[in-house]
Image: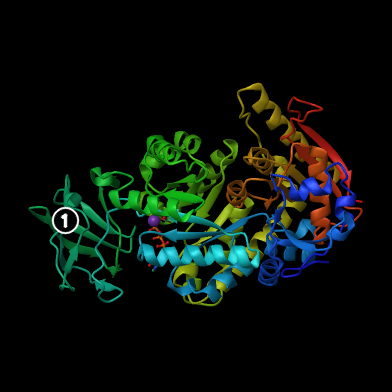
Amino acid sequence: MAVAGDMVRLSRQIFAKNPSVPLKKQFFGVSVRPWKISPNVAKFRARATIGVRSMVQVDLEAQGSRSSVLLEEPFGFDVVFEGELREKGFMGLRKTKLVCTIGPACSSMEELERLALGGMNVARLNMCHNSREWHRDVIRNIKRLNEEKGFCISLMVDTEGSQMNMVDHGGPSSVKAEDGSIWLFTTENFEGSRPFTVQAKYEGFSEGITVGDELVIDGGMASFEVIEKVGNDLRCRCTDPGLLLPRAKLSFWRDGKLVGKNFGLPTISTKDWADIEFGISEGVDFIAVSFVKDANDIKHLKNFLSTKSSDSIKVLAKIESLESLKNLEEIVEASDGIMVARGDLGVEIPLEEIPTVQEEITRVCRQLNKPVIVASQFLESMIEYPTPTRAEVADVSEAVRQYADALMLSGESAIGSFGGKALSVLQMASSRMELWSREENQQSLLSQFPLGESLPERIAEQICNCAVEMANNLGVDAIFVYTKHGDMASLLSRNRPNPPIFAFTNKSSTRMVLNLQWGVIPLHVDLSDDMEANIGKTFNLIKIRGMVKAGDVVLVVSDVIPTCASPTVFQSIQVRTIV
Ligand SMILES: Nc1ncnc2c1ncn2[C@@H]1O[C@H](COP(=O)(O)OP(=O)(O)OP(=O)(O)O)[C@@H](O)[C@H]1O
Ligand SMILES: CC(=O)C(=O)O
Ligand SMILES: [K+]
Ligand SMILES: [Mg+2]
């Protein structure tokens, strides 16, 4: 069995099984794909020892040549899933994906690797913090881990957005506002800290605000009453004492309703555009847009990405304002995925509404087949303590029970002392709840809603729905799907099947994007037009890695198949036994 770091010696047998392609052509034709060859064996050997790609030693003496060359098989694995599969079997594989926010507590190579080994599927970079150079180093380090150690971690840039918050003067980490104390909220720029004075980030923060309005800090950390308006500044009396943290969020309320929404600021600010350009140039996989208001915000960014030929980068809309909730369906339709950003959402809607809103967003996303991340405060107490509260574990389990595609850590990983432990709590709690849902047959309760409009789309959807029903009823070990843009894999995932979905794609961007989807294990492999050859090749490759064994039963769903023999695309479901 080959493991990470091993060199896989196959000699000729693998190709003997695949005689349809002449060996010489396969290796030395004008197009060397799907095989890369280097005459520089030493270099390849060196990479083989640090890398985990499948290395294939081919003895060319059999072909009348004396030398032997080492070939790199471009087969992208995920060492963490491989390890889990060997340890726990197909049904033990975790389906819920995990996102970690990278901050100072976990940005070193060692810490990143620890999170990678702990099951991080996506790394989130919150552009609210730190410099682009800092984020660039993190991105490059993660790419290096993927490249050299065989992890499969996708990258997400999360925009700062135009939120109304306090300016961080780099002073003490929090200031206490006492009951009845009088504070000035100003837009005046000043250095250092001034007693009882808070600088608001935008000039127009007090527009439309009148005496008597309530100013709420961070959704309820502290509250003030506006007692005087002095130009743009507000003099306020503390009515509910509490802590003012650096960059705390400000919101205004009148008669129990939010006022002064958005302050007329664009969803994507000038700085956000620069951060997006940065993300494009660093080759990230997702851009999460903060404080989305409507579908146009998303369409605008997607157009921009396509003019930059970067449409392989997927756009996630963060639902964290009242306005985004009003336009939920159109935003979900326009975007490639959603984040339920409960932190800021809790500033704009009453806290007791968060659970039902979360469930509703998750439901809409699955109906419209868009991945959904549930985010914020899952294990907040673990920023300081090594164990979670029981209520926190229940919250994690509830999101898993709702079949969210992914769960996210924020401060727990970014600044917490126990990021690795927090990740393992997510990991264990999700696996446990997935098992329970399967045993209770909760999937059967999922209602589907027809998506496709054109006949080919409807066919693809029906094939995937039926494939999952078959896979569940037959109790197959795994579903294999061959997919270029990930659509079939996504339609399978939408049905939340019992067995894991191995999605083989020849586009590395598709692989990184599928990484966010429930139950999908995306693998990068060169695919040809000949589906039978693809099936044979992928069965062999993953058998060699010890991921499947003879006798395992696999349901194969295929889509990418126009061949000379059958020039029309046909989609099929087959049940195969690994031999
Ligand atoms: N790159 C970073 N550098 C420093 N601190 C960070 C970084 N990323 C996150 N943090 C810290 O981690 C904590 C929580 O993370 P984060 O900022 O992602 O939460 P959030 O406020 O919910 O996100 P958002 O600003 O998108 O609403 C914050 O208090 C922040 O100070
Ligand atoms: C994640 C995020 O942006 C929030 O919870 O507000
Ligand atoms: K953000
Ligand atoms: Mg937010």
* 253 or 330, nearer to the observer: 330
**Foreground residue among 297 and 58:** 58
User: Ligand 4: does it lie within 8 Å of the C-beta at label 1?
Assistant: no
- Coordinates of residue 468 in the picture (x, y in percent): 76, 40
Relative vertical location of residue 373 with respect to residue 223 in this rendering, above or below: above
Q: Which of 204 and 480 is in front in this view?
A: 480
Q: Where's residue 421, x and y in %?
A: 58, 73
Name the quadrant where ligand 1 sits.
bottom left
Classify mark 1: helix, strand or loop: strand
What residue lies at 21% left-to-right and 64% top-to-bottom? 238
**Residue 177, x across and y down, in percent:** 24, 70
Give the residue type that dot 1 points to.
Val
Hey, which residue is sitting farthest left in the picture? 230
Of 541 and 116, nearer the camera is: 541
Locate residue 420: give its quadrant. bottom right
Residue 472 seen from this side: no
Q: Tell me which corner region of the image, top left, top right, bottom left or bottom right, holds residue 558.
A: top right
Crowdedness near tag 1: few (<14), some (14–19) or many (≥20) residues, C-alpha within 10 Å: many
The residue singled out by tag 1 in the image is 226
Quadrant placement of the N terminus: bottom right
Q: Residue 336: percent from the left, percent from the top?
A: 52, 41
Say if residue 457 shows up in the picture: yes
Determine the residue positioned at 53% across, 51% down: 373
Coloration of the structure image: rainbow
Give the number of callouts: 1
In this view, 430 is above or below 172: above
